[in-house]
Amino acid sequence: MLRTRARRRLARLWGYVPLSGAGVLAGLTAWVALEYWGRGQSDFVVRAAAIAVLAVLAVSVIGVALAALLLFVHLERRGEGRLEGRLEVGRGLDTALRVPRFRFWPLVRVGLRWVTPAAVSVTLRPAGRYAAERVVFGERGRPERVERLFTVGDVFGLAAMAFPRRWSASLVIEPARATVDLTTAIRNAAGDGHAHPAGEVEGDLVEMRRYGPGDPVRLIVWTAYARTRRLLVRMPERAVAPQPSTVAYFVAGPGDEPSASVARTFLEAGLLGPDFTFGADGCPTPATTPDDALAAIIGAAHHRDRGGEGLGPFLAAVPRERLGRCILFVPGEPGPWQAHLAAFVEALPAPPTVIASADGVLERPGGRWRWLREPPADVGADLRALPGLYDALRRLNAPVKVVHRSAGRVLAEAELEALRHV
């Protein structure tokens, strides 16, 4: 810990020195060449080259130092102040920050990245004399402080300076919505022909169930058989549709952003029914409304290191008779939360439905030139761990579904098996 802090402090102090590692190496090399060959052996070619390198280095250092000073003064005079707003993961936000473009000094380049929160991509777009900042958040959360790191360097990479700036913030970053509606996918994966718990009627305005021996042939829905090759029979429409209460819990952990997106889809589509109880890591009391449940999902982003610890208090806060129908949203990566999940499932009166969600590349390109088209290794790292996670969850003797957020569908066992060989 002390070594890490010392390295960070040294890196921050080095940022105020207008020299990069390449600049130090180039300067030392030019100085040695000038002293040994240029003056010691009177090599005028080497002397001229060394002097040229040192001159370029000096101009770069002076230009970068001056540009960094002007940028610092500009930020002091025109700070954007407190950041406020509510947006989704993946949606762009144009902030009020403007940085000089230094068109009078084309050799200077200004860079910017966010240190806190870290999962933010930043682009600077030309806006007249200045460059406007546009950010895209990669994770949900409620950041109360924003720390930016400004860098000023030359095009040769010889000189560079960096300094941080902090602003207060009141941002609410919601999880992204799923790309497609998961209602049909989840219902078909369960092998159920009834409407979802919200009671909305889908398809024909009657209830249906699987054909059983002794059912009249006239009640068979032949149109459904033509589409799905499954025999379904019509049933009289009920005057009052059943409204089962659902208990759901969101488990936080590394790689839980796709799971948060799927959980939000369940809430907004009414898949948990009108009378639900929702819990999440870091949420002291269970939520009973979609807005409170979404707030609990957002707040769970700050409890990833203690994912699953809230399952015990949640079990004690919910009446046991309501735990017969339970849905658990878990990350798509293994983590310490699995031990807490196993203890929670064992204490339930009935097996819950476990929904793990992930994102990534399902299929890698083939062919002779696949190495040219293959995505980076870290893109599919989470998916390569999915089969092992699926096996561990299945050992809990509970129904497990793996949702691919980008595709918006439940992965079949054959697809999970194929990931073992990626």
Image (spheres, helix red, strand yellow):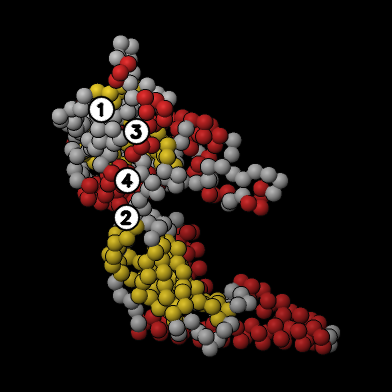
Q: Residue 265 bears which disc, if any?
A: 4
Q: Nearer the viewer, residue 44 or 343?
A: 343
4 and 1 marks in contact (CB < 8 Å): no
Q: Residue at x 61, y 49 (%)?
A: 374
Quick check: can you spot residue 291? yes
**Amino acid marked by disc 2:** Glu
Looking at the image, the residue that sits furthest to the front is: 218
Viewer-nearest of discs 3 and 4: 3
Disc 3 marks which amino acid? Arg
Q: Which residue is mark 1?
A: 207
Marks 1 and 2: in contact by CB < 8 Å?
no
4 vs 1, front mark = 1
Tell me the element at label 4.
helix
Res 312 seen here: no
| Distance between mark 2 and mark 1 Cα atoms | 36 Å
Residue occupied by mark 2: 174
Percent across and percent down for residue 310 are 28, 40
Badge 4: residue crowd in 10 Å (few <14, some 14–19, many ≥20):
many
Q: What percent of the width, then of the height, locates residue 262?
A: 35, 44
Q: Position of residue 39 (x, y in %)?
A: 79, 87
Q: In terms of sequence position, does the residue under pointer 2 or pointer 3 come before the other?
A: 2
The residue at the point 45 percent across, 85 percent down is: 129
Label 1, label 3: how far apart the Cα atoms are: 14 Å
Indicate which disc, 3 or 4, sits on the residue closer to the N terminus: 3
Secondary element at tag 2: strand
Residue at 37 percent across and 66 percent down: it is 93
From this view, report whether residue 112 is shown above or below residue 230.
below
Identify the residue position indicated by label 3 in the image: 187
Upstream in the sequence, badge 1 or badge 3? 3
